[in-house]
Amino acid sequence: RGRRSARVMASILPPSDSADDAALLEPPLPSDAPASSPPEIADPSVLASEPPAAVVASPPHAPISSQTPPLPPQAGLPPSTPPALSPPGTTPPPVAALPIQTDGGEGDIIAAAMFGFGGLALFLVCGCSILRYTRSRSYYPMEPNALLRTCGSFNLTLWPSVIVILVITSAGLAVAYILDPDADQAPTVVAAAAVIAAVAAALIFLRYILEYILEFFDWVTFLCRPAPYIVTIRYEYTYNTNLSQIASTLCSCLNPCNRIFPTVQLFGDKGESRRRALYAMGTWGGGRVVGTDTINFDGPPRPGLRTTTRVYEDHPELKVSTEILEFTFRLPSNALGPSGELLWVDMSVPDRTALVILVHHLEVSRAGKSWYLPAFYKLGVNQHSTTIFEATAKLPQQCSDRERAARAADLVINREHYKWQEYTRATGFTNKAWSANADAMLPSACWFGKTATNDVPLLGFPASLQDNIPINEYFGVQKTLDFTLAAVQAGIAQFAANFFGTDSKDPRMKETWANTEEVTLTWKFTPMAPPLLWAAGPTAEAWQTDAEFSAQILQGVWPDAMEVATEVPRRLRPYLSPGGPGCASTKLPNGKTAAEMVRRKELLVVDLAFMLKYQNLAQAPFVASITALERTAGPEVLKPLGILLMWVDEDGKDVEQWYTPADSPTDWLLAKTYARSGMVNWHEAVVHATNCHLCTEPYVVAMHRCISSQHPIFKLLFPHVKYTILINFQARESLISPGGVFDEVSSLGGPNQAFVLAMADAYANFDPLQEHLPNKLRRKGLMADQGCLPEGSYAYRDFAMPLWGAIHDMVEGTILGYYKTEDDVLADNELGDFLRELETTGFPGGRFKASDFASRARLVELLTTVVFVVSARHAAVNFYQYKQLAYGPNFPLWMNRLPPRFKNTVRSTNEALSYMCTRTASVGQASVVWVLSQYGSQDLMLLQPDGVNARFQELFANGPGLREVIAFRDRLGKIEIDGRVAAQRTTKGSTQKYEVLLPSYVPESIAI
């Protein structure tokens, strides 16, 4: 560059009178360099032929940029040889004007591009900040200092700004290189990029500067005042798991600094603090990480099948781990009145965010005194404010007027989110095929929005209505992933079973199974675990044995289907009484008469004769049955005596057929299969869906509408009703609605909705205490002291009764601890509203009477029943579904043909399969019960390891409630130890142990 500059200078400067000037312009040469040749002069003839050019001489010290540009290289000189200057005192010959060339144009282009990009970057950064400031003013119009909120918003531009700066710098350097490969303008480009980056960085870090300045003034402000209130909030961020909001949710996920900023206000007995926005919450300068909320693998493995937990162990990248944060701030000491007593905290968030903040709890302290406020409450999406009360449980009559007003205001907000949806004729709950049941109805549920047909067409909800579900009823991210994994596995299983599980000689899809080996082969091609019932060789045909048939009635998915006969059933008298067509002598094959068995309490029956009414509405063949069982002294406990099948044939004639173990193996197998088909349809429609799911939801909705979160009954029920509303919504939307799963897999599905009518018929006889365990078992003659099934012979009762006792004692201790007298029950206006809403709206049709539960004893029985149903009862009827229902021929929801009119018509087991479930229904049934039988990876069990997911027990921070929760947990630990020993003796002729009611396997709520 030095030699090139010298050439330029030499070509444009005038002759110098001093040799020193030439020496300044010409760089020194090595001593051994050859002397330069004189420059060649242009041919005079050529110059003469061209018009003269005006040559303007520049002053000796004029700026370089204003002088004549350099000449091109002269011919005859090597490129590296500099031109010689004229001798001192001589005049150089005239030089012709040549075209001007310069690099200045390229520099201007680069500079313009860089400043254009820089202006765009500044516009984006400043625009985002101004927009956030404007939105802050709209969020907090009553607060004069909106900059306090906006300073926390500058970090929202952090990642976009960094990306813009890097893109600008890279693009600028790329343009510079393209326009000038010699990189002559590189310093200019780098300087421009550095200036832009510095300005943007200053804007970004202004947020941090402001934060520290504000914190300093905050500290100085409180330094000279009495001890302030120190407030610590523990929380975590999660995301909206509603699929209809997936776009906004993904945008939030892509910006890790996108946080919402709650506003907090403290209230005391005489005053309240100013509203304070937690501007730094969740940012680098604010909340600190104190833990993670992730999957717990410390608990015992779930029994019977490979759950989603196994998937997460194999693929840890699928685990969702959320940081739990803490943030601490100060409030003036004189804010809450003279006494300084804290009563509650109001918290709100902006209404435009896809993020959700889950508040665990708040801790407030001042001058040695502290308050604890449990929450576990979500804010965001469609729920933007809540009231968090101090942890001490109180009845309304124990509160001050100020507290009662706050509780009432909070319930007004809850009523906006939890609305009633009734299922009566007036709301469209009907079917033209139900002409004789025009007044059919179901328990009410949580309302999700107006649908096409007068609010609700037969339980069907469009998925878009999930937007109306209160955010506190949403599943967490991990539970949503649990469902997704299980559904994907079930979908793959259906595909594989339909296309790879057929006989290799006939690759076409067959409507019925060809043989039992083909059914078993299905699971070879699916990600679902083979059902335990036939996973091993010796048990591959266990479903055909009488021992397995009896064991599944005794401790299966419907474990109290049977009852002890107090007389010979009327329909069975022709077959069990002396001289009947089923007995050639006065005694049964066991050597006893039916009357003698009744007297000795050895005759049990499963009576499903009433289900014959649904045959004409069924979409596939359906048969009613009565099963007679004998109580034995052997290890098998029960033994089948006979099965009566009842149906209407193709000619409209009533048919009854009595089957016994003495019939051919194929006829007897068919009889047991038809009986089990009726049992499983009633189980799914009534025992599981209606009595556990639907009849629980009114309690949840009424609780949120009528009972404050500070009420001891709310604290008692809250852990046991989590996720119930949303799981019921999904069941209505995808399982039991028109066109749902059960229309595809159940004989009672289809356009006539016999499945739903069975649910409505069961609700017609609803009793709030129908699932009261001791009363129900005693009514059926199944208690140990009634003589039929002694201690150790009936696993469901032996495992369920200790759980019932523990729940009953916890509820009783809590109720009696807060309601000192019967008058306290009558004076509780929130409890009164709760019971009245259940009577008028929750259970329409007069099925619930509020006056029946106006005493402490009756209230204890009601709440114990509710907690037992949502925990132990639901676990018993749900989590064995896959093991017993996944193998279609064992418990088929769909039967393919009516029974043969005459015995000995069917000769083989493979031929009997043609009467049983179709392939489509069988695979669909297996897929749905696979999903329903999965334990959630984060479900809270009744008994958890110490310190693991026990946070809901913090709802009671003191008083009788806390004492009873601790005693309940200790008692469950002893039940777990005894239960594991007892489970080793529960096979009773079956292939499986009964472990589903161990406290560590029982979820606290209906979450599946």
Image (cartoon, rainbow, N blue to C red):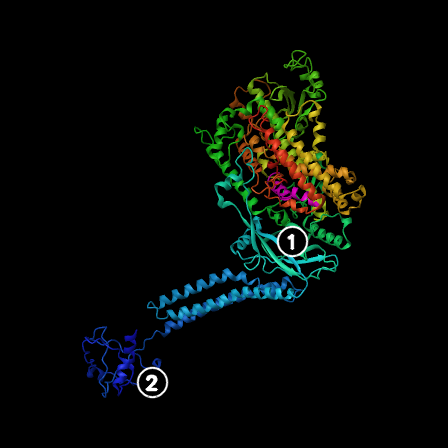
Please name the residue that numbered disc 2 is placed on.
Answer: 61
Name the quadrant of the N terminus.
Answer: bottom left
Comparing 452 with 997, the one in front is 997
Q: Residue 103: image x %, image y %? A: 34, 73
Name the quadrant of the C terminus.
Answer: top right
Image height check: is 770 above or below 32? above
Pointer 2: residues within 10 angstroms few (<14), some, or many (20+)? few
Q: Residue furthest top?
A: 585
Does the magenta stretch mainly form a helix, a strand or a loop? helix
Pointer 1: residues within 10 angstroms few (<14), some, or many (20+)? some
Amino acid type of the residue that numbered disc 2 sits on in the rendered structure: His
State which tag comes first along the sequence, 2 or 1: 2
Residue 720 shown in magenta: yes
Q: CA distance from mark 2 to mark 1?
A: 79 Å
Image height check: is 216 above or below 245? below
Q: Which mark is residue 564?
A: none
Question: Horizontally, is 155 left or right of 563 in the view?
Answer: left
Local SS, label 2: loop
Image height check: is 81 above or below 92? above
Tell me the quarter of the picture where residue 676 sits.
top right
Residue 433 shown in magenta: no
Q: Residue 935: image x %, image y %? A: 57, 38
Comparing 431 with 110, the one in front is 110
Please name the residue that numbered disc 1 is placed on.
Answer: 363
Q: Residue 927: image x %, image y %? A: 54, 36
Amino acid type of the residue that numbered disc 1 sits on in the rendered structure: Glu
Q: Residue 38: image x %, image y %? A: 19, 81
| Start-end of magenta stretch | 714-736
Residue 684 shows in the view:
no
Which mark lies nearer to you, 2 or 1?
1
